[in-house]
């Protein structure tokens, strides 16, 4: 069995809007904080404020030297949003309702959708800001002699992952035509992944088009399609060029369970047997 990692990391101060901040707590500070965590009063754990107060009052404390090798434990404090790094968009991201019902949040997604046969549609030939049409999709399926079936996970390669963390990652990606996405959904697909920021064209392209003619259909059309059809995106995939075949593999992409969130981070992988 061969497992190929198709994800990018959540990264400290990446170039994205509302970027992430990761504060790494080292072993020595970790030791001190663990010691404080261990303070109790009348058999109950003391929550942070009281721990710190007792610490400042000079209550006996544990420090790194009290741990084996003079080192406590390390961890990471992360300030980020659910749509950073490789992640699954839940229908509630697209709008409050979907198919006439309350849109599913990340908590409510059937996990079966995220462990299924994969098919790769290689759109690496498309230019900057170009539309990937329904015909492009059909031509590619013909070229690889594949018929999409219900619950397949469809992966779209644009090659934009190579520009991750550079400004043109946000500015230059091609985007899927809503007709193409609608056609894929109508084959029974619930999950479509892409190795760029979004299934849609870059925000700057959509906003400028909208400002020209005020046609609402320019604004995040493949996302808005998720109000009509219940389906999920996987955004910011990577390494799709490393797949040894474009069909005959399994994709696993379970979103992390963030209660009632509109998205969940995932470590998407392709599994070849
Ligand atoms: Zn997203």
Image: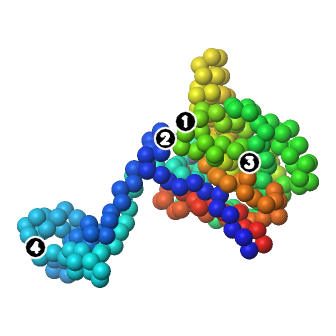
Disc 4: which residue = 59
Can you tell which of label 4 and label 1 is closer to the viewer?
A: 1
Q: Tell me if label 1 and label 2 are in contact, CB under 8 Å.
A: yes
Earlier in the chain: of badge 1 and badge 2, it is 2
State how far apart marks 4 and 1 are (Cα). Answer: 50 Å
Badge 2: residue crowd in 10 Å (few <14, some 14–19, many ≥20): some
User: Which residue extends farthest left?
Assistant: 57
Residue 189 in the image: state x and y as whole percent. Answer: 76, 54
State how far apart marks 2 and 3 are (Cα). Answer: 23 Å
Disc 3: which residue = 156
Q: Tell me if label 2 and label 3 are in contact, CB under 8 Å.
A: no
Residue 208 in the image: state x and y as whole percent. Answer: 60, 22
State how far apart marks 2 and 4 are (Cα). Answer: 43 Å
Q: Secondary structure at mark 1?
A: helix
Badge 3: residue crowd in 10 Å (few <14, some 14–19, many ≥20): many
State how far apart marks 1 and 2 are (Cα). Answer: 7 Å
């Amino acid at each position: 069995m061969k497992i190929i990692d198709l994800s990018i990391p959540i990264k400290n101060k990446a170039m994205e809007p509302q970027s992430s901040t990761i504060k790494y707590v080292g072993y020595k500070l970790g030791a001190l904080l663990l010691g404080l965590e261990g303070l109790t009063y009348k058999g109950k754990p003391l929550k942070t404020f009281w721990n710190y107060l007792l610490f400042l009052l000079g209550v006996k404390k544990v420090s790194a030297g009290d741990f084996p090798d003079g080192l406590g434990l390390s961890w990471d404090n992360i300030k980020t949003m659910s749509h950073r790094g490789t992640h699954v968009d839940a229908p509630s991201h697209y709008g409050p309702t979907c198919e006439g019902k309350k849109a599913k949040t990340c908590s409510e997604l059937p996990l079966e959708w995220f462990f299924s046969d994969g098919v790769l549609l290689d759109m690496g030939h498309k230019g900057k800001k170009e539309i990937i049409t329904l015909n492009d999709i059909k031509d590619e399926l013909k070229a690889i002699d594949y018929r999409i079936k219900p619950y397949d996970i469809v992966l779209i390669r644009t090659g934009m992952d190579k520009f991750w963390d550079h400004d043109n990652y946000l500015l230059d990606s091609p985007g899927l035509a809503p007709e193409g996405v609608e056609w894929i959904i109508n084959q029974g697909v619930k999950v479509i992944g892409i190795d760029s920021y979004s299934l849609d064209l870059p925000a700057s392209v959509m906003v400028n088009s909208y400002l020209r003619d005020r046609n609402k259909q320019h604004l995040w059309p493949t996302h808005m399609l998720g109000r009509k059809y219940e389906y999920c995106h996987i955004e910011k995939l990577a390494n799709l060029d490393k797949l040894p075949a474009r069909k005959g593999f399994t994709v696993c992409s379970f979103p992390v369970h963030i209660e009632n969130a509109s998205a969940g981070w995932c470590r998407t992988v392709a599994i070849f047997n």
